Image (cartoon, rainbow, N blue to C red):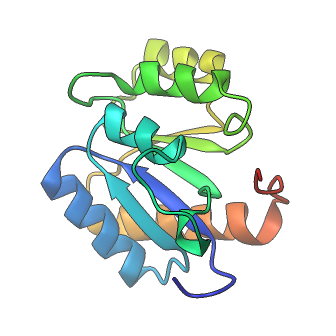
Amino acid sequence: MKENKPRVLLVEDDSADLEIITRVMEESGFSANIDAVSSGAEALDYLKRRNRNEGPDNAYPNLIFLDLNLPGMSGFEILAKVKEEPDIKRIPVIVLSTSGEPGDIDQCYALGASSFVVKPANIQGFVDIMQQIERYWFEIVSLPAQPA
């Protein structure tokens, strides 16, 4: 892990989307350490520090990107569980979904999402969004302190 870089948890089960998102983050110059998991269970294990070693690489993420359509446990369920946990509920969650359904958007905000972003249809759109997200969340906004 490189020092002073924010840490992002990416919860995405689709390997093609995961590859696109990580490639776009690299191409856009997204300056964060990215940890990726592919299911809700893995996300909760990661966030609750299960099966992880102690040390600097065990830090909580500064930001979570969450897909809604996941195997076993939906993104809605993960979001609800994250926002119930005292140690992790302050971590901003950006829902990154193919769905633009008003009901999905409303439900995510009701559950405590910080942002809802519809995945763009093309790579350049993704690059633009990631640059804006990085600027907003890591340059403009003051994020909460890391839990102990």
Using the image, determine if residue 71 lies above or below residue 121: above
Front in this rendered view, residue 43 or 126: 43
| Occupied quadrant, residue 39 | top left
Q: Is residue 104 left or right of residue 147?
A: left
Image coordinates of residue 143 in percent, x first then y, are 80, 56
Q: Is residue 87 left or right of residue 100?
A: right
At x 48%, y 17%, the residue is: 102
* Count of all numbered marks drawn on residues in the image: 0
| Occupied quadrant, residue 15 | bottom left
Front in this rendered view, residue 105 or 143: 143
Evaluate whether residue 90 shows in this view: yes
Image coordinates of residue 61 in percent, x first then y, are 59, 57
Residue ranking furthest to the left: 16
Front in this rendered view, residue 1 or 62: 1
At x 44%, y 68%, the residue is: 34
At x 47%, y 12%, the residue is: 103
Q: Is residue 129 left or right of residue 39?
A: right
Image coordinates of residue 116 in percent, x first then y, are 54, 37
Evaluate whether residue 112 shows in this view: no
Using the image, determine if residue 33 lies above or below residue 20: below
Using the image, determine if residue 31 lies above or below residue 8: below
